[in-house]
Image (tube, rainbow, N blue to C red):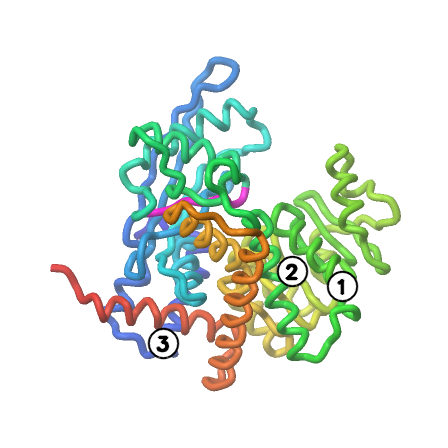
Amino acid sequence: MKECDSPTFQLATEQFERAADALKLDPNLRERLRLPQRAVAVTIPTRMDNGNVQVFTGYRVQHDSALGPTKGGIRYHPDVTLGEVSALAMWMTWKCALVGLPYGGAKGGVKCNPQTMSRNELQRMTRRYTAEFVSVIGPDKDIPAPDVGTNAQTMAWMMDTYSQQRGYAIPGVVTGKPIVIGGSRGREEATGRGVVTVAIEALNMLKIPVKDTTVVVQGFGNVGFHTARTFHEKGAKVVAVSQSTGGIYNADGLDIHALMRHLAEGHSLATFPGATPVSNQELLEIACTILVPAALSEQITKKNARHIKCKIIAEAANGPTTLEADQVLEKNGTMVIPDILANSGGVIVSYFEWVQDVQKYFWEERDVRERLHHIMKSAFHRTVEFSRNNGVNMRMAALMRGIDTVAQAHLARGLYP
């Protein structure tokens, strides 16, 4: 599948191959799981505000559906490719299996720059994108959610477009929606809160008090903000955060609430009072207890891994660490909480939202947080136990557990015809 070739897809497939080797996975199952079950590319002609029509390219990849309907986000970004989307769909499969959700993995995206597009342009593009995939998505087939460059409003447009095609409201077709049309309380913060949950469990294992913890967060979007905010509220010291243009550092800690107000008022990150500007590369190498890569993939590489000075890496982004960097970090004794575990809070609460939509019964935010905490904590400790029992690192343990669960489902279901 040459169209899938990309560094991100190569990373995902190499991770899979190594885990499959360790599992001694049946060769027939290996062939079924290393490529997506379905990959669709479409063109999306969109009327721009100036009257011209611009044609975007969109994708939806469903990696595996052995455990149930596929699930995964939609990202709007200039660097979206079929290979990247296919890799993200694969990781979603292992992620859902690892934490015990009845889903397979999927992902979608549009190659565009949402920051240069108006609200009306984004709405027209989103609705056309959704219309192109009406036959392949649905609450019992494939359930999209927000990702990089998309949000609750994007999901509202998708839900409305799909519902208009079907003739009645179907809130369960997407998750991450506004609460007023079937969204779940606690969804927006879920990924960040989940990252903090497993990071604190790791701190407890290492006997490091939260109040003595320093945190660096690369990426200050939705996930990075909620991760930083939650750490800040729990008493940890967030000493550095960054956006795509660079970051800021204060050894005494940043007031995350004040920083958000600063940004909401239209000021830049670099002008936040009392902070020193740093580059994204410098930020990754700041000495700290916990480093949270919450931006894009392949940020920690063989080149910079030896300069990273933290005890724990909690991967809030998908695929932020290369295979070569993993080896360096393991040799240096850095504990890596892998992406398919650390950032699974988003899909867990998306599952809660889907359940609520299907049941037409909605939970209190306290219930969402408690159930999220329980699932994340349990998954973390099961992965640690597997790691210790099998003499593998945390990433390999998480991958092996996820892949084995999907493999068992395929063996139980058999091959049709």
Amino acid carrying mark 1 in the image: Ala
Rendered view: 323 above or below 296: below
Q: Position of residue 15 (x, y in %)?
A: 43, 67
Mark 2 and mark 1 in contact (Cβ < 8 Å)? no
Residue placed most toward the observer, 232 or 299? 232
Report helix, strand or loop for mark 3.
helix
Q: Position of residue 225 (x, y in %)?
A: 67, 49
Circle on res. 21:
3
Amino acid carrying mark 2 in the image: Val
Report helix, strand or loop for mark 2.
strand
Q: Which residue carries the number 1 mark?
A: 236
Which residue is outermost to the left?
417
Quadrant of residue 261 within the rendered picture: top right
Residue placed most toward the observer, 248 or 220? 220
Circle on res. 98:
none
Q: Name the magenta segment's main secondary structure.
A: strand
Q: Bounds of the magenta span?
A: 142-148
Mark 3 neighbour class, 10 Å CA radius: few under 14, some 14 to 19, many 20 or more: few
Residue at figure coordinates x 84%, y 60% from the top left: 251
Q: Which residue carries the number 2 mark?
A: 292
Quadrant of residue 236 within the rendered picture: bottom right
